[in-house]
Image (tube, rainbow, N blue to C red):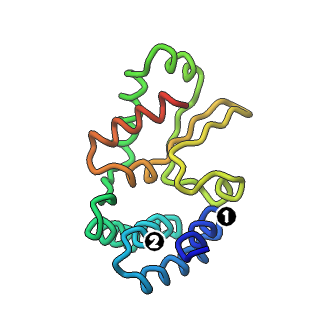
Amino acid sequence: MDLLQSTRALFVAGRVHDALESAQVACERTPRSADAWALLARVARHAGLPATSEDAFRRAAALSTRHLVPIRVPGAEFELLIARARQTLSPDAHRRLRSTEIEFQAIPDPADILSGIDPDALSRRVREPRDRLVIFQENLENRCRDREELAQLVARVMSRA
């Protein structure tokens, strides 16, 4: 298993600080690897290091057009994106989400990850004790260059829930 695969395995297993150390080593060993910087960016976000994360996203984007510098929006604006997306849902999606509480949080918390939620998940549907859809704001932002892409991704996530 190569270093990036083992780092990703640590990350998915919820061993964020071990994954952070491993991602940093990967970036030191292969400083021209956009994939290493992109992984460091995501792991650093979960480790509570937003400045390190943003720097790593910029480095990954500078090395490869496959990677981007994510858009960041305030929570109030993200909440508006969710409300607008809910209004544009198809009749079928609207019916499926009619009694669903839609919430957002930055990223999956450590307990979510330990229970099997991918740290890069876009959302999580919880049906018990009440029906909730949790949308992970920063994970969506990590995949979008601008507000329009983010709005479209929010709508797509909700329509598939």
Q: CA distance from mark 1 to mark 2?
A: 16 Å
Read off the residue under disc 2.
40
Q: As displayed, is residue 71 above or below residue 91?
A: below
Q: Residue at x 51, y 16 (%)?
A: 92
* Dot 2: element: helix
- Which comes before the other along the chain, label 1 or label 2? 1
Which image quarter: residue 38?
Answer: bottom left
Quadrant of the rendering where the C terminus is positioned: top right
Q: Residues within 10 Å of mark 1 (few under 14, many from 20)?
A: some
Q: Nearer the viewer, residue 45 or 74?
A: 45
Q: Residue at x 63, y 70 (%)?
A: 10
Q: Amino acid at mark 2?
A: Leu
- Percent position of residue 87, x then y: 39, 21
Read off the residue under disc 1.
13
Residue extending farthest to the front is 1
Quadrant of the rendering where the N terminus is positioned: bottom right
Q: Nearer the viewer, residue 32 or 50?
A: 32
- In-image side of 119 versus 151 (left or right): right
Q: Residue at x 36, y 28 (%)?
A: 84
Q: Amino acid at mark 1?
A: Ala
Q: Residue at x 65, y 65 (%)?
A: 14
* Tag shown at residue 52: none
Residue extending farthest to the top is 91
- In-image side of 132 versus 129 (left or right): left
Q: Residues within 10 Å of mark 2 (few under 14, many from 20)?
A: many
Which image quarter: residue 61?
Answer: bottom left
**Disc 1 and disc 2 in contact, CB within 8 angstroms:** no
- In-image side of 83 versus 118 (left or right): left
- In-image side of 131 versus 120 (left or right): right
- Percent position of residue 115, x then y: 72, 53
